[in-house]
Every structure is written in C-alpha cells, then in structure tokens.
Image: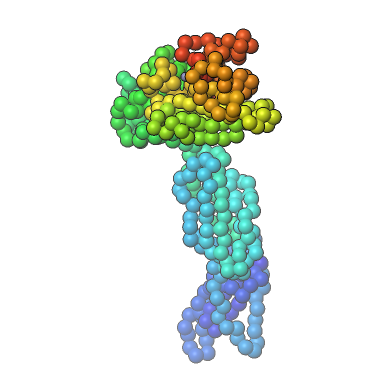
Amino acid sequence: MSWLQITTEALYLMQGGSNKYLEKVDLETGSETEKRLDFPLAWFQEGDDIPRSAIVSFENLPSEPDPYIPIRVTQPPPNRVDIQERFTIEGLTDVSNAGKAVIIEVSGFKVSSQPVDDLGHWQVQFVFTQAGEKSLTLIIGRDRATFNILVNNPRRFPLSGSVGYLGRNRDTDIRAVKQRLNDLGYTWVTATPSIDTGTLNAIRLFQAIINQHYQIRGAGVDGRVDPNGLTHRWLEAKNAPRWQLMPIDNTGLFNYERQIQTTDNHDYGTSWMADTLLAAGQDYQRTYLDAHPQAAQIVINDVSIPYGGDTPDHATHETGMSCDILLPRTSGGYLLPTWQDSRYDRDAMRAILKSIRRQPLTSRILFNDPELIQEGLCLRASGHDNHAHFEIRPPGRID
Ligand SMILES: [Zn+2]
C-alpha cells in the first residue's frame, strides 16, 4: 500500500513498506514562507494502490527520499525465437524488491522464476513450447514489463508453389525448402533463392530416402517439392530423416569405416540408420557381448558418401539406408575373406544379425552363410561372402 510524504521540496508518493518514492510533485517556488502544491489527482483514482495515509512530521522535516526503481530491462528477450529455444531476460529492480519472486505470465499462466538478488538484479530463462505471436509479462512486486515475441516452429514452412525441377520456384519458397534441408544436415544446400545442382540432388536424395530406395531413382524421385505433397510433409515431420556422420563407436559397435579405413569416405547416412546402429549395438552388448566379452563388436563398414548418391564401390548404398557388417573372428577381431574361413565366429554373427533384425526399421539382410540362411536370418546374394549388407525402411511419419 502506497503512502504520502511531504518535504520542503516535494510531495512524494511512496512505495509501501519502503523509503523509496514512486512518483513526486515538486512544490512550486513561492515566498520564503510559502510554497504552492498542485495536487496530483491521478494518484487517487481507481486502483488497488491509492495512498490512504500520510506521514506528517512536526519536528525534523524528513530528508528527500531516493526514487524507487521499477523494472529496468538490461537484456530484453529476442523478438523472434524458435520453439524449444531457451532465452534469457535480465535486468534490475529496486533493492527493496530483493528476495521477491520474478513471475512470468504467458497466456494467463504464471510461473515463478529465481528471486531478485540482494543488489536488485534479476534474471529469468524461458522456453516456448507452442508457436504463434506471444505476449510475455514479467511481474516483480507491483511492476510489470510486457514483451511481444513471435515464436516460430522451424519445421513448418508453408509453400505458395512447387520448388525444384520444373517447379514454380518463387524466391521465398526456394529459401524455405533450402533452409529446412540445411537444418536437417543437408548442409551443402544454403538458403539462397536459386535452384542449383546441389539443391536438386539434395531433394532427390531426400525423396529416395522417404520412398525407401537404395539408389537415387525410382517412384517419387522427381526433384520437386509440391505444396503439401509427400516430400513437403516429410520435410516438416518431427522424425524427418537427417543427414549425418555415422556413429564412430558406441556400446557393442565399432565403425571400421571411420576408425581404420579413413581414406574412404562412406561415412554418412540417415539419422534413421544411425539410430538403428546404436540400438543394435546396445542390443548385441546386452544379449551376447556381456556373456562373451572376448567376441567382436558389430563392426560396420560403408554407408554412403558425404552428399549421398552414386558410389563406385557399391550398386546401392546411395541413400544412407544401407550398411555393411564385417565378419567377426573367433579371436575377437574382424575382417575375413569369406564365411568359409576357419576363423569365422558364426555364433557372434548369429547374435549380430539377430540384434539387427530386432530393430524396427530393418528391412532385409544379405549374407551367404548357408547355416544362417537356413535359420532365416539372412538372404543369399552374390558378392556377400565376406560381409553382410543390411537395409532399413522409413518409419511411420510423425507430423
Ligand atoms: Zn552393402
């Protein structure tokens, strides 16, 4: 509750419970013995904080009080943020607010943040989980500060026309598609308003992935993103296929391609393949390696080259959806000319194939060990005596 104080200089509207003033009206100079005061009627209008008392001193006139400092923002929030992007707001307030909570109000919901410190400093962090034009209000004691913030969902980009090969190719649409491809790891695509070979290749690679092709051709691979078509929907999906380096090693998993054969560059693939490999390695550790610690890990070789596409080393392997597995040796090593070699560890290979088959995206495994074929774990295919080759399919799209 505010209160009044009068001195020889001014009438002060004082902050309740403090010696700080919120507002003041200077007395107008008159004679030595008289000064004039224009009464500030606004202080007494409707509100919860009308002054209802005054201090009158009959002896020592009070000294002039210090002003009360309302919320002062030293670091404002950004005008635009993405969903799930954490940001900070910082500032000062009057030290009489020390220990008071800083309350954040968004769309009628209030949350308390860290309290104001002894020096009157405060800092809040916030993250939006929904897109749209938002109003965020900070409340400290009687003070408020409001900010308008546009919250983007970076996955979503409306298209006014098609983009890519024989598309309408409006500048803003091209930029939006290229930005999203870049965000997803197709980093050779930069958000300029031009359709170049790299962009078309990235669109075709993306289309081959979502249509479960292992080469960059086939149904659905036309190099064009149509508004609300399958490619557009997948680009906006929560589980859109990212393009990335394959895991270098992890539980139960060893990447021969990245650790040993470093002059070769079949190191890239889809996030779907990376997740499948990590999960298969953990499954193999739990179901086999724990009990057979001397056995080889799952040793993976070529996935795809850095931008995807044709590779001289393989008929497929163009889309980050196929991966090779080297043969485990009984000594715990790997790499053998054929499954007929006496050093071949069939038990480990059986467990590896089972761990891969247990992953939800695994679609088929090619490998020529007749016993494992007999057991239904893999299929025969020429050229697969010295390694197994497996492929994955797309997951269900999560919009
Ligand atoms: Zn292969």
Could you say where residue 197 lies in the image, as x and y percent from the top left? Answer: 30, 26
Residue shown at the point (39%, 34%) measured from the top left: 187
Could you say where residue 199 lies in the image, as x and y percent from the top left? Answer: 34, 28
Whether residue 42 is visible to the viewer of this picture, yes or no, is: no
Q: Quadrant of residue 114?
A: bottom right
Could you say where residue 15 lies in the image, as x and y percent from the top left? Answer: 61, 69
Numbered marks: total: 0
Image position of 382 (left or right of 296)? left
- Which residue appears farthest toward the right when viewing the image? 291
Q: Is residue 62 above or below residue 118?
A: below
Residue shown at the point (57%, 83%) measured from the top left: 63
**Along the line of sight, the residue nearer the viewer: 287 or 222:** 287
**Along the line of sight, the residue nearer the viewer: 243 or 291:** 291
- Which residue appears farthest toward the front when viewing the image? 342
Residue shown at the point (33%, 28%) measured from the top left: 198
Is the N terminus in the top left, top right, bottom left or bottom right quadrant?
bottom right
Is the C terminus in the top left, top right, bottom left or bottom right quadrant?
top right
Residue shown at the point (49%, 19%) measured from the top left: 337
**Along the line of sight, the residue nearer the viewer: 162 or 394:** 394
Q: Quadrant of residue 202?
A: top left
Q: Is residue 109 above or below residue 172?
A: below
Whether residue 32 is visible to the viewer of this picture, yes or no, is: yes
**Along the line of sight, the residue nearer the viewer: 78 or 96:** 78
The way the protein has been coloured in the rendering is rainbow
